[in-house]
Amino acid sequence: MSGREEISSPRRTKEIIAAHGFSFKKSLGQNFLIDQNILNKIVDAAGLGKDTGALEIGPGIGALTERLAQTAGAVTAVEIDQRLIPILQEVLSPYPHVKVRHADVLNVDLHELFAEDFAEVGKVSVVANLPYYVTTPILMKLLEEKLPLANIVVMIQKEVAERMAASPGGKDYGSLSIAVQYYSEPELICTVPHTVFIPQPNVESAVIRLKVRERPPVEVKDEQHFFEVVRASFTQRRKTISNNLKVRFFPGEGRERLEALLGEAGIQPSRRGETLSLAEYARLSDVLLAAGIS
């Protein structure tokens, strides 16, 4: 696209929007990025090359997609808003290795998509400016389905990014931190002011990279049970782990058996859920499972 302005420039973004009579839908969380420096940071963090693929979720009018097309060997952009499909097909026409799909990514068979769109490349990274209202469901689908992913690099609400990257003991650490860190290694890349979007959101954003693990950092006998124990431990953050687990797993019993099992796992009953590491949760989950508590 030599001689043409990048889609991400404020002038070209406004030009494309005006030419197609596009209006933003608040219900879809549409905020288009118009800062080329931030786009560069996102693409650089993904570690792309001509032998890798990129899956973009929510491409908007294609500002990030264009950068991905210039870097990756195969690009698929999944867009839920039908009104954006003709715009994307037009602005991305110079890039034959870019495929635009009209779909809700939460309803897409991602294993099938990967087999169809990324058969000719090696590892794939997800790169996206995610709508805030569906950030967690989309990220957990990507992680839980155990796709052949290298990195997930997303721009999301800053507060959520900080929770994903939080360490035990802090106010941001919770069940989301544990789930994300079980499947990946999170790293905050940069914070993003609301002024670099059209329209401007009401919250600060951040770019986070999730380096997808080959295998989890802890071994558990039953993943589903592990996550149930984690969620139960954060039912009420101010309560001790003993109180939270009693409500979920020991509703009709005294406290003695629970505290004995916590002791077996090496965990003081008076501790709160946010102080436990992944390794401690793995140990606790296995102890409860071995005792028939599920």
Image: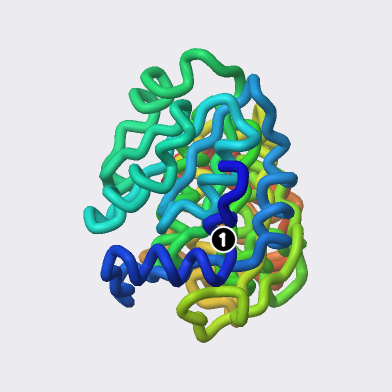
What colour scheme has been applied to the protein in the rendered image?
rainbow
**The N terminus appears in which quarter of the rendering?**
top right
Q: Residues within 10 Å of mark 1 (few under 14, many from 20)?
A: many
Q: Is residue 133 left or right of residue 233?
A: left
**Element at badge 1?**
loop
- What is the x, y in percent for residue 275? 73, 66
- Under mark 1, the amino acid is Ser
Name the residue at the left extreme.
82
- Residue 188 appears at what percent x and percent y? 74, 59
Q: Is residue 114 left or right of residue 245?
A: left
What residue is shown with label 1? 8
Relative to residue 281, is residue 174 depicted above or below? below
Q: Residue at x 53, y 52 (%)?
A: 128
Residue at 39% over, 33% down? 99
Q: In this rendering, does residue 145 appear at all?
A: no
**On the image, which quarter does residue 36 sit in?**
bottom right
Q: Residue pushed farthest top?
A: 120
Give the answer, above or below, for where 113 lies relative to 229: above
Going 61% across and 75% down the picture, which residue do you hit?
A: 196
Q: Quadrant of residue 287?
A: top right
Q: Where is residue 102 drawn, in percent x and y?
A: 27, 44
Tell me: residue 216, above or below residue 274. above
Q: Is residue 266 visible?
A: yes
Q: Nearer the viewer, residue 3 or 24?
A: 3
Residue with the most extreme bottom position: 202
